[in-house]
Amino acid sequence: MNKKNLLLNAFILTGASLLLRAAGMLFRIFLSNRIGAEGMGLYQLISSVYFLAIHLSSGGIGVAVTRMVAERPTEYGKSAWDVMRTALLFSLGASIFVMALLLVSSDLIAEYWLGDIRAGTPLRILAPSLPFIAVSACFRGYLTARERVLRTAAAQILEQIVRMAVTMALIPLMVPMGLEWGCGAIVIGTTVSEGCSCLFLLAVSRGRKRPPHARERGALRELLYIGMPVTVRTCFRSVLSTMENAMIPKGLGKYGVSTQQSLAQYGMLKGMALPVLFFPSSFISSISSLLVSELAAVPRSRKTSRQNEAANELTRQVLRYALLFSLFVAALFLFFSGEIGRALYKEPAVGSMVRILAPLVPFMYLESIADGMLTALDQQMSVMKYNMIDAVGRLLLVMLLLPRMGMNGFLLTMYISNLFTSLMCISRLIRVTGIQIPLWDWLGKPALSAAVGGFTVRFLSRAYLQGMSSAVLLVVECGLCGIIYGLCLLLQGAVSVGEFVDPLRARLRRRAAREA
């Protein structure tokens, strides 16, 4: 993938991701108004089991397909489609088994694991979506490796549209029947949308006729070698995460919070505050997925020193821009959390949670970038080790801190967990690539610029911007803060106009030369 295609594909995926996350945020606001914080808490408990089922049935298959297909040069050649055939058979078998298991045991999971029998029916409704998700993961991995990101973006947009349409049509009919059926309306929309997305990907992936050939040996072994560490770590972490999620309302109850209040607090954190914190990560998550195929296109052991230098420079620049962006986002959440809580949910408690967690944003975003690049560089075993240690540690901290500190104990757990995993992944990436990170230029100057922007806009807001609605005020404050942040970076030399303008000029010159 050349730089032009990488930027174009990143632009497509980022645009689609922003659109989807914006729609998802509005959808969550709609849901929170219809089923309340307690309903959001119940839905998050259901989702934790559902995500575990997804990881068990198709956890690492998408990453494995992307990497294996990217290493095979012929677009419709035998090797790439051997990978697809093997991946589809394996993921379908695993997903059907997990679907049957979930159908049989949903009531037991709801009563004895989640501690809320109301979760049983929604879990049964979600089970048939698992084979669709597994097949979709294979086709998304293939299309990403073959640079057909517009098709994967279209599938995601279709999926979100169908989910929202079905859920919004059913919620008025099913919410009066109780929270169990209110969540049932949401999961019906999820199951239907996953089926539609899978059928769409199947249709757009049917290309030219594949020539008959002898089957490539070893595809399953390589698929398991790449995908199993990802699956094991995500499943292990998901099992402990599901246990952790089930323990949070119980731990808050031991702290002295009622069952209804504990579920509401849990819903505000997981269903409202965290989606807000992760919403801006759309700008870098698309780059992360593309880097898997970009860095894996030539196995590292076969790269020339020049190719290694180019890959390391790409890694370095992605980390740099991710840090510049995430520090700015952290400043927005830190200084304007009150407006965010009021504008989105009309709930001050959500704004308080956003403000408390704002300093974690750079670590969260960098971890996702480093995780993807380490997997592409054949370091998935190290990532698995870090994630497993983190998952065990989180569970122990939840058991220890929640009965003594309440929700503050869980927020402290999040700080310890995210700092550990992000620092371990970033340090491993630095050791593998040998890149150098100038801390003052990459961290000090952007942090200072973000602080200047936040404090300046906060002062201007209190002095001159009173009387606006929360939504308008939030947009104005974010825009002003962005302008000041960019100017401060330019004045300090942390960025230059040339690094953004020169590539555009070069592209215009090449276009003019071709036309001449």
Image (cartoon, helix red, strand yellow):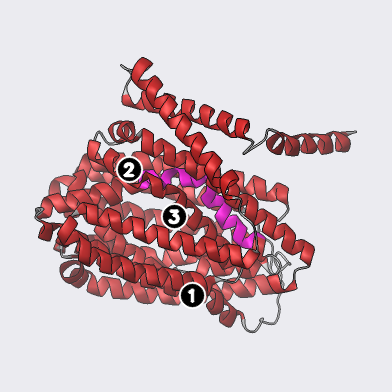
Instruction: Tell me the residue at 12%/57% (across/down).
Output: 255
- Amino acid carrying label 2: it is Val
Mark 3 / mark 1, whichever is N-terminal: 3
Mark 3 / mark 2, whichever is N-terminal: 3
Q: Which residue is mark 1?
A: 229
Instruction: Tell me the residue at 70%/76% (across/down).
Output: 212
Give whichever of 118, 403 is nearer the camera. Answer: 403
Q: Which residue is mark 3?
A: 196
Residue 178: x %, y % from top left: 14, 50
Is the residue marked by circle 1 packed among few (<14), some (14-19), or many (20+) residues within 10 Å? many
Nearest-to-viewer mark from 3 and 2:
2
- Amino acid carrying label 3: it is Cys
Instruction: Decide if residue 102 is in sight here.
Output: yes
Q: Which residue is mark 2?
A: 354
The CA span between labels 3 and 2 is 34 Å
Nearest-to-viewer mark from 2 and 1:
2
Residue 260: x %, y % from top left: 12, 51
Residue 493: x %, y % from top left: 64, 36
Instruction: Decide if residue 16 is in sight here.
Output: no
Magenta-highlighted residues: 275-294
Nearest-to-viewer mark from 3 and 1:
1
Is the residue marked by circle 3 packed among few (<14), some (14-19), or many (20+) residues within 10 Å? some
Q: For residue 511, which quarter of the picture?
A: top right
Quarter containing the N terminus: bottom right
Quarter containing the C terminus: top right
The CA span between labels 2 and 1 is 32 Å
Instruction: Tell me the residue at 79%/38% (across/down).
Output: 506
Q: Secondary structure at mark 2?
A: helix
Query: Any magenta on residue 403?
Result: no
